[in-house]
C-alpha cells in the first residue's frame, strides 16, 4: 500500500523510539472514524452529545493545565540561531532532538500510534503540501480529520519519493514542565510532547501551515500568513477577494463570516468565507497573487459566539463538531459557553468536569468561575458554514484584490486607511499592534506590537520575513492594495465609537471601491483616508452611548490622524524595531519609518 520509502523508514524509526503496542493507519474512511469515536467514548476521552440537537457532535476536556498554546515552550530549531530571529525561542536542533528523544523514549508503550496522512490545501493542487502526523491520541486523529484533508489519497499524491512534513506527537505524561512544541524547519519536522491541547497538537495548523510553511514560503517564493480570506459579491454577481490579518481578540472569525447590513443584503450584496485563520498566497498564472485556505475546518473560540455576533460560526457547530472545554448541559446533553445566550444551564458540568453553579460566575475570574474555559473551542467542518465560498475547494485558490491589516487601538489608528504602495503597506503590517483589553489578564491598554499578526507564528527571523514581504512585489506582476483598519476606537468615556460586526461591511465596500479606482480619498501623513461622505451610512443605527446616535461627525472624528498619538506610537515602534528586529530591519522599512515620521512631525 505505502510505497514512499522515506515515509516507511521514518515511521519505523519513530516507532522504535516511542514503542507503541500497535500502529494504525488512518485511511480517511467514515467507518474507521466512527469506530475511533466509539472507542474514545468508551474510555471517556470524548462524550457523545445529544444526537437530535447536535448530530455527530462530541465533547472533550483537556487536562486543566493544558488549555492554550504555550509560546514560552515553542521553539524554532535552526542550525544557526540568527535564522530563528530574536522573537522566537531557539534551541540547537541536535540538542533538541537529544533532549526530546529522551522524553519520547517508550512514551507510546501500551498505546496505539496512529499514522495520519494529510494534505494542507486540496490534495494534489499547486498549493498542497503533504504531512504525516504520528500521534497516540484519538482526539488528535478526529480533530485532524475535520481540520485537514486526511486519507490514503495523500500517500498516493506523495508518490514513491515525495516530500512530506514529519510530525510526531505524544501525550507522554502531560508534564507541563516537559511540554515542548519544537519545529525543525531545515528538516521539515515538528515534535510536540506532553500536551493534548489543539494549538499544540493539531500539527497541521499553526506548526505546519504557519511556522514551517512560512519558512518554506520564504525559500520557494510564496507566503504563509495568519489571515482570513473572504469574498465580497456585488449585486452584479462579481466577487472580489480580500485577506486580512488581525492579532487575537480582534474579531477575525466574525469578519470572515460577516453578514452585510440589511440595506446591502436587499440589494444583493453577499460575503463568502474562504478561511478564518490561515492563508497561503502565491503568484498565479495571471501574475496576480492568489490565496487559498490550507485548512478544512474551523478551530474557533466558543465564548462570545452567538446568534448575533456570528450566526454563521454558530451554525457551523451544529453537526459533526468536537467541542473542547465548554460547559456540559446535563439536562439535555448539549453544550454551553459564556455569551451563547442568557440562559446558563442549571444542571451542568464546567470545563473541568465539575458540577457548575452559574450564579457564582465572576467576570474577573473567568478561569475559576465560568462554565466554559475562556479559550474553549469548537472544531467544525468548513462545509457546515452557511456562507462558505463556492471556491473553497478550488485548487487554484482565489485572486486577492486587497490585503487588510488591523488591530485594536483606542485612538491612534483611524477606522481605515490605505497605504501608499506595497512597500509602505509592508511597513504598515510591520507596525501592527493591539492594546490589551480588560478581558485579558495583565494591564489594560498596553500596546503589544504584532507585525502581520505573525509574532507567535513566524518560523524564521522577523526581519527576514519583512524582506520576504518586500520581495513578493517583484515575484508577482500585480500586487493587492494594502489597507489598515481599526474597529475599536473609543470615546473619552471608553465607549466604542464604531458599531463593528456587520457594519464593517461599509468599510470593506470603500476598500473595494479604492481598488477599483471609483472613489477618491484624502492623502494624509499615514496614507489615504476616506472622505467621511464616501462611507455609506444608510441604515446604520448605532448608539455610541445613551442618547448619542452615531453620525457623520463621529465618523469624521474616527477618520482623523492624531499627531500626538502617532508620535507616541512611533517612539514605541522605534523601540520595538531596535529590540526585536535589530540589524535585520530592511533598509526600505527604515526609510518608510523615517519618511512617515517626518510627515507626522510637519503636521
Ligand atoms: C488561533 C490563534 O487559535 O491565533 O487561531 O491563537
Ligand atoms: Mn489564529
Image (cartoon, helix red, strand yellow):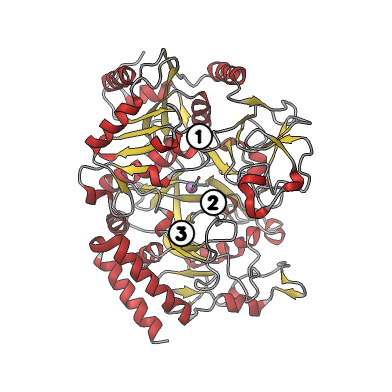
Q: Check the picture and name the quadrant holding the C terminus.
A: bottom left
Q: Which circle, 1 or 3, is nearer the viewer?
A: 1
Residue of label 3: 402
Q: Mark 1: give few (<14), some (14-19) or many (20+) Cα within 10 Å.
A: many
Residue of label 2: 231
Residue 77 is tagged as none
Of the pair 80 and 529, the residue shown nearer to us: 80
Mark 3 and ligand 2: say if the CB distance to the nearest ligand atom is below 8 Å: no
Give SS at disc 1.
helix
Give SS at disc 3.
strand
Disc with the residue nearer the chain's start (1 vs 3): 1
Left or right, 112 with respect to 157, comes to right
Image vertical order of residue 254 relative to residue 347, above or below = below
Residue of label 1: 147
Of the pair 8 and 293, the residue shown nearer to us: 8
The total number of labels drawn is 3
Residue 349: image location, x then y, percent: 70, 34
Residue under the point 41% across and 31% down: 119
Q: Check the picture and name the quadrant holding the N terminus.
A: top left
Disc with the residue nearer the chain's start (3 vs 2): 2
Q: Place residue 473 in its image quadrant.
A: bottom left
Image vertical order of residue 194 relative to residue 531, above or below = above
Residue 20: image location, x then y, percent: 39, 16
Q: Is residue 267 visible?
A: yes
Find the distance from the CA under tag 3 to the CA under tag 2: 11 Å
Image vertical order of residue 565 relative to residue 400, above or below = below
Mark 2 and ligand 2: say if the CB distance to the nearest ligand atom is below 8 Å: no
Find the distance from the CA under tag 1 to the CA under tag 3: 26 Å
Give SS at disc 2.
strand
Left or right, 16 with respect to 310, comes to left
Amino acid at each position: 500500500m505505502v510505497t514512499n520509502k522515506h515515509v516507511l523508514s521514518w515511521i519505523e524509526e519513530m516507532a522504535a523510539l516511542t514503542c507503541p503496542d500497535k500502529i494504525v493507519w488512518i485511511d480517511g474512511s467514515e467507518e474507521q472514524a466512527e469506530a475511533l469515536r466509539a472507542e474514545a467514548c468508551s474510555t471517556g476521552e470524548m462524550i457523545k452529545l445529544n444526537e437530535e440537537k447536535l448530530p455527530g457532535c462530541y465533547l472533550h476536556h483537556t487536562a486543566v493545565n493544558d488549555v492554550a498554546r504555550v509560546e514560552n515552550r515553542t521553539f524554532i530549531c535552526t542550525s544557526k540561531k540568527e535564522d530563528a530571529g530574536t522573537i522566537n525561542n531557539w534551541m540547537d536542533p541536535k540538542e533538541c532532538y537529544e533532549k526530546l528523544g529522551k522524553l519520547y523514549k517508550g512514551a507510546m508503550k501500551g498505546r496505539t500510534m496512529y499514522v495520519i496522512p494529510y494534505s494542507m490545501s486540496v490534495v494534489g493542487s499547486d498549493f498542497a503540501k503533504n504531512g504525516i502526523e504520528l500521534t497516540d491520541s484519538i482526539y488528535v486523529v478526529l480533530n485532524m480529520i475535520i481540520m485537514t484533508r486526511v486519507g490514503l489519497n495523500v500517500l498516493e499524491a506523495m508518490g514513491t519519493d515525495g516530500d512530506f512534513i514529519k510530525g510526531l506527537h505524544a501525550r507522554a505524561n502531560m508534564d507541563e514542565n516537559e511540554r515542548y512544541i519544537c519545529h525543525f524547519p531545515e528538516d521539515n519536522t515538528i515534535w510536540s510532547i506532553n500536551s493534548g491541547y489543539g494549538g499544540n497538537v493539531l500539527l497541521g495548523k499553526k506548526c505546519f501551515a504557519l511556522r514551517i510553511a512560512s519558512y518554506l514560503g520564504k525559500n520557494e517564493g510564496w507566503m504563509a500568513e495568519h489571515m482570513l480570506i473572504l469574498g465580497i459579491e456585488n449585486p452584479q454577481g462579481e466577487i472580489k477577494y480580500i485577506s486580512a490579518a488581525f492579532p487575537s481578540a480582534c474579531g477575525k472569525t466574525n469578519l470572515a463570516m460577516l453578514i452585510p447590513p440589511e440595506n446591502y443584503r436587499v440589494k444583493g450584496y453577499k460575503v463568502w468565507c474562504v478561511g478564518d485563520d490561515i492563508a497561503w498566497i502565491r503568484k498565479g498564472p495571471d501574475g496576480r497573487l492568489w490565496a487559498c485556505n490550507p485548512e478544512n475546518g474551523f478551530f474557533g473560540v466558543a465564548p462570545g459566539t452567538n446568534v448575533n455576533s456570528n450566526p454563521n460560526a454558530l451554525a457551523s457547530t451544529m453537526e459533526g463538531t468536537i467541542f473542547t472545554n465548554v460547559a456540559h448541559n446535563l439536562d439535555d446533553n448539549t453544550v454551553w459557553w459564556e455569551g451563547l445566550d442568557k440562559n446558563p444551564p442549571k444542571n451542568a458540568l464546567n470545563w473541568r468536569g465539575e458540577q457548575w453553579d452559574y450564579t457564582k460566575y465572576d467576570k474577573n475570574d473567568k478561569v475559576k468561575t465560568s462554565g466554559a474555559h475562556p479559550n474553549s473551542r469548537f472544531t467544525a467542518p468548513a462545509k457546515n458554514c452557511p456562507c462558505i465560498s463556492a471556491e473553497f475547494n478550488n485548487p487554484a485558490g482565489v485572486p486577492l484584490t486587497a490585503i487588510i491589516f488591523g488591530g485594536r487601538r483606542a485612538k491612534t489608528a483611524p477606522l481605515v486607511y490605505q497605504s501608499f504602495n506595497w512597500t509602505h503597506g509592508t511597513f504598515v503590517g510591520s507596525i501592527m499592534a493591539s492594546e490589551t483589553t480588560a478581558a485579558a489578564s495583565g494591564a489594560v491598554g498596553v500596546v503589544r506590537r504584532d507585525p502581520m499578526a505573525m509574532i507567535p507564528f513566524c518560523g524564521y527571523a522577523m526581519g527576514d520575513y519583512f524582506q520576504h514581504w518586500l520581495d513578493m512585489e517583484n515575484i508577482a506582476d500585480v500586487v493587492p492594495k494594502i489597507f489598515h483598519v481599526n474597529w475599536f476606537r473609543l470615546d473619552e468615556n471608553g465607549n466604542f465609537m464604531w458599531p463593528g460586526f456587520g457594519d464593517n461591511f461599509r468599510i470593506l465596500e470603500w476598500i473595494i471601491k479604492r481598488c477599483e479606482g471609483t472613489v477618491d480619498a484624502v492623502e494624509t501623513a499615514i496614507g489615504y483616508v476616506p472622505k467621511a461622505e464616501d462611507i455609506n451610512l444608510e441604515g446604520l443605527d448605532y448608539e455610541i452611548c445613551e442618547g448619542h446616535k452615531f453620525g457623520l461627525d463621529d465618523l469624521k472624528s474616527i477618520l482623523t490622524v492624531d499627531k500626538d498619538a502617532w508620535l507616541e506610537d512611533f517612539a514605541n515602534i522605534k523601540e520595538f524595531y531596535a529590540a526585536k528586529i535589530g540589524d535585520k530591519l530592511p533598509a526600505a522599512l527604515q526609510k518608510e519609518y523615517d519618511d512617515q515620521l517626518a510627515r507626522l512631525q510637519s503636521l
